[in-house]
Amino acid sequence: MSGLIPGLHSNTIISIFSSFGLESEQLAFLIIALFPVHLIISFIPSIFFGIPEQQTVISILPGQRLVLDGKGLVALKVVLLASLLAALISIALFYPSLSFFQFVYATIRPYVGYILVIFSLIFLLRTKNPALSVFIFLLAGMLGFYSLNTKMQDSFLPLFSGMFAMAAILNYQKSKIPRQKDEKIEPDSNLLKFIFLGTIAGMFADLLPGISSPSQVAIFISIFLPVNTISYLATISSISMSSAIFSFATVASINKSRVGATASLDKIFNIEQNLTLILVLFLIAIAIAVAIVYLSRKLIAKLANIDFSKFNILLALYLFIIIAVLDGVIGIIIFALASALGFLTIKIGVERTNLMGAVIVPTILLVFKIFLI
């Protein structure tokens, strides 16, 4: 259910479950199962929910454009196919990647800061409004820096809950979509090419801190290859799944956790000694999630017309209470500022991927040993 709530990050869910006092092994298996399921389910709201009127179609996500054309189920099938194939390719490449990651990371480690700066500049210049993007990116970076330097129990909880979950709740609008056609998709060579490319890109994204966001990597790919709506969905889905799987490889090979769920798992479970078990459970969870979503695809399309306003109020209240309990007054302040920043980002039409400056900027400052406090 968590993936159906627009903006609710998997890190937020894990933080909430961590507060329930579960045994380490129970929480570990819960994270392993939740991680891939949340990834797949979270594509549903990005396709079907919160769709604006036709006049503002330029501001919406690629999957939502297909929904307005009555092809939302096609978009969903592409996501499911890409996620499943990317998972299989990633698992096939997983064990060879362990030694490969060690070699590559040792080579690029002295230049990580410069790579992050160059990537950020390219990413920001490729946005619709570079000036506003830089503004949001730096604001998020400042907020992220001070949030990560507080003594809160979980610095990421108020930060990401505010920027993504609460901002999405504040911007929620009831959708009315046209009838969706259940058309077949033909996985041609072009589609398969983007799935494979996305898988490889997701693999390399895990080597660098702060840039493992699928949207960021997909935008970078679009610099070199023309990407249409379908191929973009295939690319971003495969990046998302590949990055998730290879995040276990980076922990085992270079002892780096680039993904929040993996970082949480690494604190309570020995990832390196349980790689096969993790991969098996992960693949089972993916298969179950894909099967459930595919079989319930028509129901999902109908759910898009339900008004979630009252549920969103309960979710906002729950997030407020959890943050207050775990992180106190400072957490509430960070949550409020992050919510305002996320809401502003949506309202001025800037890509929300710029909010990842909250992670990238502190990382750059750390690498170059620049201390602001």
Image: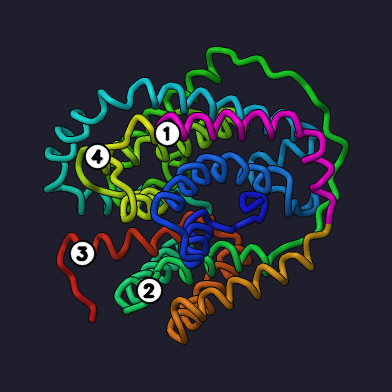
Residue assigned mark 4: 252
Mark closer to the chain start, 1 or 2: 2
Judging by the rendered image, the residue that carries numbered circle 2 is 153
Q: Position of residue 40 (x, y in %)?
A: 58, 39
Disc 4, SS: helix
* Mark-to-mark CA distance, 2 and 3: 21 Å
Residues tagged 4 and 2 counted as in contact (Cβ below 8 A): no
The overriding secondary structure of the stretch rendered in magenta is: helix
Location of the C terminus by quadrant is bottom left
At label 3, the amino acid type is Leu
Q: Which residues are magenta?
A: 279-306
Determine the residue located farthest toward the front in the rendered image.
23
The numbered mark, 3 or 1, whose residue comes first in the sequence reads 1
Q: Which mark is residue 242?
A: 1
Q: Nearer the viewer, residue 185 or 219?
A: 185
Indicate the position of residue 358 as horizontal and vertical percent values.
39, 64
Which colour assignment does the render follow?
Answer: rainbow
Q: Residue at x 29, y 65 (%)?
A: 362
Q: Name the image quarter holding residue 321.
A: bottom right
The numbered mark, 1 or 4, whose residue comes first in the sequence reads 1
Query: Disc 1 to disc 4, how far (Cα)?
Result: 16 Å
> How far apart are labels 4 and 2 at the CA level?
25 Å
**Which residue lies at the image location 51% right of the left edge and 23% below the top edge?**
85
Residue 165 is labelled as none
